[in-house]
């Protein structure tokens, strides 16, 4: 009898530890022991190596290959990875830049694939994976408070420009909706809200408001007593309004409301000016650059403003070309079409999946998530892969 080749445990260990590595590596924790540039270079080399090793391992395992070959999501992501590889090879000026571009461009896609396989093969128990992400969410909140204190000490005042670490909180928050214990869920959400409020980041605040709003909508649709649902939601909204007003007025001296009032006068943070400059630069590009892009972070360095596009779709257009932009749009459309299936599969997974999708759509439209801070979005794409994989398992059983 032929022996069936099973998936070794080393793959489980690799896939689970990959996210913490990216988290600590991209935060440049190692910069405490060496120069920041040297630390970032090491992280990019290791990250690119881990990506390549994962793909080679997947293709060498027939069980994994047969699983992912039927997924439209994975097929699109492998097209993305192939195009990013071409982009990295032709546009990078040296070996270090090749590894950085490849690492930044493929990081989010590889996490989706890894956690999709984990779910489809039932290689991790939910009771194991949930605490990992809850712990990382709490760590992200702590890092936000540390950043807040450090900026206050160095700048002598409140500024929102240095609080990009808060996007870790927003991207990790959907994982808390998978937790069964309500006291833990409410406690973590409350702490996360405080962290986002003190950051004063408009995109993060709007994203958090949308996430909580949709969570309340799905809570009303849950199988609970109507009166208890009204009381819970009413009390929660009252507490949220109170916390917002207290932090904004007493602690931030009206900083949050001031930033929103300034949004219209400063042309939405000068985003329209940035987008216009990017499209003008793109029109001046040659045919190859229009199709395959200029290279990761090229607009940041060549745009003349030394700013990111503050829109991941336009960033993709300039840095990775119109073909990759089409792949990204198709991937997002597939994610939106899968919402109903995941919601049908499980209320908690559906809520987490939808709130993570809201986070991506919100941040990707008016900020930078895919490439400038790729270590943030991996927590969202890991959730997508795991949720879709689990829902497909249920559908397979029902059929």
Image (cartoon, rainbow, N blue to C red):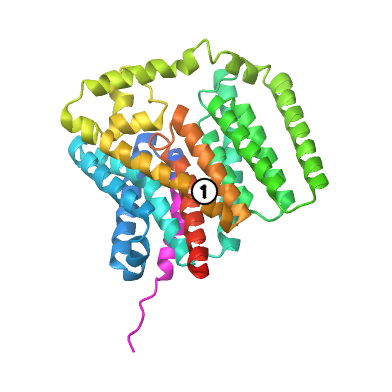
Residue 131 in the image, given as x and y percentages of width and height: 60, 56
CA neighbours of label 1 inside 10 A, class few (<14), some (14 to 19), many (20+): some
Residue 333 in the figure: left or right of residue 239? left
Residue at the image position 52 percent from the left and 10 percent from the top: 265
Q: Is residue 158 visible?
A: yes
Q: Position of residue 82 (x, y in %)?
A: 25, 48
Question: Chief secondary structure of the magenta span?
Answer: helix
The magenta region covers 1-24
Residue 172 visible to an observer of this rendering? no
Residue 95 vs 55, above or below: the answer is above
Left or right: residue 364 versus residue 289 is right
Is 289 located above or below residue 330 in the figure? Answer: above
Disc 1 marks which residue?
Answer: 339
> Closer to the camera, 78 or 332?
332
Residue beneath the point at 74% across and 49% down? 183
Name the outermost residue toward the bottom. 1
Front one among 372 and 226: 226
Residue 166 is left or right of residue 278, and the answer is: right
Above or below, 202 against 168 in this view is: above
Reply yes or no: does residue 4 show up in magenta: yes
**Closest to the observer, 258 or 227:** 227
Total labels: the figure holds 1
Name the element at disc 1.
Answer: helix
Q: Return the x and y of residue 106 as percentages of the image width and height.
A: 34, 46
Rendered position, 7 above or below 227: below
Measured from the top left, where is residue 84 in percent x and y?
A: 27, 42
Please report the residue visible at 51 percent of the width from the left and 69 percent of the height from the top: 397
Q: Quadrant of residue 173?
A: top right
User: Residue 86 magenta-drawn?
Assistant: no
């Amino acid at each position: 009898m032929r022996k069936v080749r099973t998936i070794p445990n080393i793959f489980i260990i690799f896939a689970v530890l990959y996210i913490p590595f990216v988290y600590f590596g991209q935060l440049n924790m190692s910069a405490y022991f060496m120069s920041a540039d040297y630390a970032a270079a090491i992280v990019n080399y290791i990250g690119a190596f881990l990506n390549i090793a994962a793909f080679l391992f997947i293709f060498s395992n027939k069980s994994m290959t047969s699983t992912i070959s039927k997924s439209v999501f994975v097929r699109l992501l492998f097209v993305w990875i192939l195009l990013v590889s071409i982009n990295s090879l032709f546009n990078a000026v040296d070996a270090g830049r090749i590894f950085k571009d490849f690492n930044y461009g493929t990081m989010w896609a590889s996490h989706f694939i890894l956690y999709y396989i984990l779910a489809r093969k039932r290689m991790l128990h939910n009771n194991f994976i949930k605490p990992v992400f809850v712990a990382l969410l709490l760590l992200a909140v702590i890092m936000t408070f540390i950043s807040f204190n450090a900026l206050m000490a160095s700048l002598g005042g409140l500024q929102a420009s240095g609080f990009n670490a808060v996007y870790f909180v927003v991207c990790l928050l959907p994982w808390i909706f998978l937790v069964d214990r309500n006291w833990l869920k409410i406690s973590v959400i409350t702490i996360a809200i405080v962290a986002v409020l003190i950051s004063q980041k408009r995109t993060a605040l709007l994203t958090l408001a949308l996430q909580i709003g949709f969570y309340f909508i799905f809570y009303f649709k849950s199988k609970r007593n109507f009166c208890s649902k009204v009381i819970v939601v009413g009390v929660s909204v009252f507490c949220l309004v109170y916390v917002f007003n207290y932090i904004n007025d007493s602690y931030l001296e009206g900083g949050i409301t001031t930033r929103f009032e300034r949004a219209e006068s400063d042309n939405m943070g000068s985003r329209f000016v940035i987008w216009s400059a990017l499209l003008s630069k793109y029109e001046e590009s040659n045919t190859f650059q229009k199709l395959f892009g200029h290279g990761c972070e090229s607009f940041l360095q060549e745009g003349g403003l030394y700013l990111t596009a503050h829109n991941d779709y336009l960033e993709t257009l300039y840095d990775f070309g119109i073909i990759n932009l089409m792949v990204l749009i198709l991937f997002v459309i597939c994610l939106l079409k899968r919402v109903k299936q995941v919601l049908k599969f499980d209320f908690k997974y559906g809520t987490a999946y939808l709130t993570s999708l809201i986070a991506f759509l919100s941040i990707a439209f008016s900020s930078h998530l895919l490439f400038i801070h790729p270590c943030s979005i991996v927590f969202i794409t890991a959730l997508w892969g795991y949720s879709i994989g689990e829902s497909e398992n249920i559908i397979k059983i029902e059929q």
